[in-house]
Image (cartoon, grey):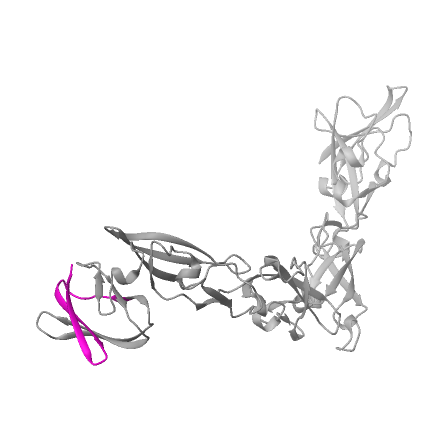
Amino acid sequence: MLPVINFYLEGGQVVDYTTFDLVESRPEWQSHIHPGGEIPSDTTINYEEGTSLSITGEVSGNADWSNLFYGDSTTQTGSIYDSTYYNYTIYRDWWAEADSGLVIDTTYGSRDTTFFNRPPQKINVQDTTKPENTYNPGDGSIMYSEFIVDGIEESSWDDNSGVVQVVRDTSQNRGTDPNECNYYNFDVQVSDSAYDPSNNWDTINFTKSIYLDPNYWSYFPSDTTVPFYNAFVVDSTGGPGEGWNDVLGDLGPAEVQVQNSNQNPDSLNPKHYEFYYENLHSVWDTICNDTISGIQSVNTYKPKSTIWTYVPDSVIVTTEQGRDTTETGGIAIAKDTLLPWYNFNVSYEDSLAWVDGLDSMFYRTFTTQDIVGQEPDSTAVQPIYQVYSVGIKTRLSADDIMLYPNPVNDRLFILTAMSEQQTVGITVYNSSGTEVFRQSKAFSGQQTVHEIWVGSLPPGLYFISIERDGTSTFQKFIKQ
């Protein structure tokens, strides 16, 4: 048995005491014996605050020589998923022991000897904290082809219980007709409500805007360069662009508009034929009328189209005659096959080919440019043989034939003087008598120069036959 002392105090002084033996064991009485001093008042606390004495209160006014103790009993039940796990009552019993080991009840002046019936401190625990949102997906946009209602990003939550249930509610203003834009462009209102086991809750709301997939080019022509006569012809610049939408499919060919052209309207200006412009390609779907546009750059050019329609034949003139065009056959004539109305300005330049004593050979090269400054692909060259004589026949009779140069590398000139126009046969033989070249040439009834190409012949001695009126005249030359 354990001795028990009950002190009666007045003004902090012991005025009387009694002792008795307590038969019950400590577990049976310790929750009923009231320690000296005032026990904390009944209180209500939040679950997340905990049940430490700093929160629930401590005994005040107890004797200095007593040691305080307390024991708790609770109505907490269930698991972490149950409300009763977070909302319950704690009954806290206090007692004191003296240094001697006696269980003491000090009443501070109360002469009430029924100290066994004093109630414990009642602590009501409640969970009133609502869940906290830690991640909100927020307002945003989702492409139609990627939209799934159940695929909208989830929100995240936290709670003092560690247990949160999220309930999602959605609504949308989507149309019902696939041929209307509001079938693909609409809003989804999302409401996420989070609940903890104590049925504390909070809600967030956000909106996801669904939009039709953007159109794009399945084909778009590259920047290009075309001849001026194909300018502004879409098929000549690669054709129109082709549009596509991943939901609607083929959008068909684009509409093409010309813009930013710097073509000069004057047909005599080179910029009328060589200029720059842009093709604006635009395509749109017929549901939402979403348009895409693209710029194709186009440059134009004028092809070379100049030909020589007349080049004066080779000619022999005297130093007395000079090399004026009235003596040499005139000026070469050019024509533009694309612009036949264009008048060319033809110029020429004479270059000395060789000199033999007082005689000389010139090459007259004719040049011209078309309207954009391009020269013809072919050259126009007239050989002119000028002899130092008042009368050519004093140098070259009607039966004479002159070859120059001799020896020769590539071009061999045949100078003749005839009394009338006739066709002459020219044949070249090698030193073995084998024919290596044959040509017929119409010679005019005057002094003329005829050129033949021997550059491909092997070096060696050759013979040339000039046949006219059934008579052949032979001369020899050396090919270097």
Residue located 61% across and 71% down the image:
233
The N terminus lies in quadrant:
top right
Q: Main secondary structure of the magenta part?
A: strand
Is 230 left, or right, of 138 in this rendering?
A: left
Is 85 left, or right, of 462 in this rendering?
A: right
> What are the residue bounds of the magenta stretch?
451-480
Depth check: give the residue in front, 151 or 199: 151
Q: Position of residue 416 (x, y in %)?
A: 26, 67
Q: Is residue 455 visible?
A: no
Q: Position of residue 129 (x, y in %)?
A: 79, 47
Q: Position of residue 209 (x, y in %)?
A: 75, 62
Is 324 left, or right, of 287 in this rendering?
A: left
Is 257 left, or right, of 352 in this rendering?
A: right
Q: Position of residue 123 (x, y in %)?
A: 82, 42
Residue located 54% across and 58% down the image:
372
Residue furthest left as drawn:
432
Residue 7: name its quadrant: top right
Residue located 22% across and 67% down the image:
400
Depth check: give the residue in front, 172 or 436: 436
Residue 27: name its quadrant: top right
Depth check: give the residue in front, 331 or 195: 331
Q: How many marks?
A: 0
Depth check: give the residue in front, 225 or 119: 225
Q: Is residue 22 visible?
A: yes
